Amino acid sequence: MRHRSKTVKLQRDKAHRESLMRNLASSLIEHRQITTTLAKAKALRPFAESLVTLGKKNTLHSRRRAITLLGSNQLAQRSTKVLFEEIAPASAERPGGYCRIIKLGQRRSDSAPMALIEWVDANVAAAETAEA
């Protein structure tokens, strides 16, 4: 039985999987949307949504937790700043479901199912900033 077996392993060991999630989340925060395989997008969604939940709290402890989850390199520092200043305030009224996954079809080379993962409210915040 599969009770409480929640982790999607993606055929990687734990350290590689954590590094992959950190890199995908940082790229999602920086670029607002990324194209990846469907399995990686489905594994990334809970990780990214937990980061937005931390960003909505906007305390020193939540910032430090986000840096811990994203890593301590320059990209993670920049991503944390963008997360807390732009992405989380745009999703302030939303109770959950901050990411959207759109299926794109199959990749030509190996027929892997591809998907686009993006923030639901990021485009609205960018439009408001452009108008102001």
Image: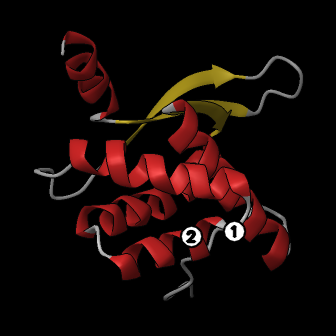
Please state the horizontal and vertical placement of residue 89, each as a whole percent of the image.
23, 48
Residue reaching furthest left? 93
Residue 85 to residue 68: above or below: above
Can residue 42 be seen in the rendering of this structure? no
- Please identify the quadrant where the N terminus is shown: bottom right
Task: Report the quarter where the C terminus lies.
Answer: top left
Q: How many C-alpha atoms fall within 10 Å of the one at disc 1: few (<14), some, or many (≥20)?
A: few
**Residue carrying label 2:** 67
Kind of residue at disc 2: Ile
| Observer able to see residue 112 | yes
Residue 63, how many percent across, how many down? 43, 71
Label located before the other in sequence (2 or 1) = 2
CA gap between label 2 and label 1 equals 6 Å
Q: Secondary structure at mark 2?
A: helix
Count of numbered badges drawn on the protein: 2
Residue at image position (68%, 68%) is 71
Drawn side of residue 16 relative to residue 18, left or right: right
- Asked if the residues shown at circle 2 and circle 1 are in contact, with their CB atoms under 8 angstroms apart, the answer is yes
Farthest residue, direction right: 109
Number of the label disc, if any, that sits on residue 72: 1
Amino acid on which disc 1 is placed: Ser
Question: Could you say where residue 116 lies in the image, as x and y percent from the top left?
Answer: 54, 30
User: Which residue appears at 31% of the width and 35% of the height?
Assistant: 120
Residue 110 occupies quadrant: top right
| Residue at 45% from the left image edge and 62% from the top image edge | 46
Looking at this view, is 125 or 41 the one in front? Answer: 125
Q: Residue at x 25, y 17 (%)?
A: 127
Residue 128: percent from left, percent from top = 20, 21
